[in-house]
Amino acid sequence: MNLDDELRAALRREDPAPDFTQRVLAGRVVARAKATHQSNRPIFRMAWAAAVAALLIIGLTATYEVRQMKAERAGRDAVLALRIAADKLNSAREKVVRLEN
Amino acid sequence: MRRILLVPFIAVCAAAQLPAQQLRITGLDGLASKAKESADITLDSNLLQMAGGFLAGAGKDSKDGKDAETLKQLLAGLKAITVKSFKFGETGQYRMEDLEPIRAQLRTPGWSKIISSQSKEETSEIYMRTDQGKVAGFAIIAAEPKELTVVAIEGTINLNDLSKLKALGVPSIPVPDKKGKKE
């Protein structure tokens, strides 16, 4: 086979396969979906990061509030406890002084 | 046989060497239901630290800042404080025997009575606990016909500073009441 025959065979007109159109269309749909998904990805990432940040802020604020409430209650209890202790201490001292006199 | 006898002997010796334990206020649980008013406060070192921080912060901007600082200093030396106080509407709501579990603890080595005033109807006692020659705690028992108070303080506290608390104006420290309002 010479060069002319080879070229003729290679450039010979061939009809496409019967499902060629369907395959091209299907490929185009997949490519479009992929492109849409890729273009949405940064938005999803940002939304996800924002949600995580919001949850973190809410969690930290709630923890701080609970701790603050606990400290407030402890402060109030401590003042009351020391006040009772001081009152009874003074009362005992006064009684001793009264008895000595 | 010798080993069997030796183990309890060592245990007894070790127990004798142990420092006096922190006072546990027991035997008064049933009195709260009979009382007109009662206070049951237990604060461990963590809560006391939180309380100190809160009081210092609350008093920082007020005219009582000095009082808050004094309170913080008082709390700084404490490891724990427990107060059980009952006010009754009538006499005879508690018996002196109810205090026996507490008195039994105060009779153990390490505790010593420093102030005692006893009359027919009233008893006031202050005990001090020492550990290796250092003050490690106090206990107060105040029994009146219609009132019973037991205080256990673990840690170091200056009793003179404590007795001055009222004069320092503790009530004016801006501690919110139960409704969240500040005094």
Image (cartoon, grey):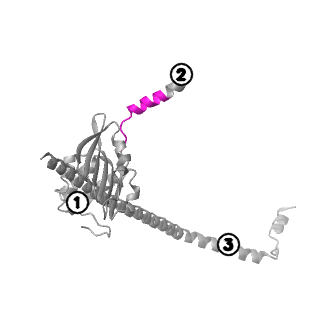
Describe residue B11's horizontal placement relative to residue B71 as left or right.
Answer: right
Q: Mark 1 points at which residue?
A: B59
Graded by Cα atoms within 10 Å as few (under 14), some (14 to 19) or many (20 or more), the crowding at tag 3 reads few
Q: Is residue A72 above or below residue B77?
A: below
Where is residue B86, by image quadrant? bottom left
**What secondary structure do most residues of the magenta stretch adopt?**
helix
Give the CA separation, mark 3 to mark 1. Answer: 68 Å
Where is residue B167, by image quadrant? bottom left
In the rendered image, the residue lying farthest to the right is A1
Give the CA separation, mark 2 to mark 1. Answer: 65 Å
Residue range in magenta is B8-22
Q: What residue type is labelled 3?
A: Val
Q: What percent of the width, then of the height, locates residue B120? A: 24, 51
SS at mark 1 in the image: helix
Q: Name the residue under label 2.
A: B2
Answer whether residue A45 is visible to the viewer in this image.
Answer: yes
Mark 2, mark 3: which one is toward the viewer? 2
Q: Are marks 2 and 1 in contact (CB under 8 Å)?
A: no
Give the CA separation, mark 2 to mark 3. Answer: 89 Å
Q: What residue type is labelled 1?
A: Gly
Residue at coordinates 21% horizontally, 50% vertically from top-left?
A92
Q: In which quarter of the image is the C terminus of chain B?
A: bottom left
Question: On what subunit does the disc labeled 3 rest?
Answer: A
Towards the viewer: B93 or A35 = B93
- Mark number for residue A30? 3
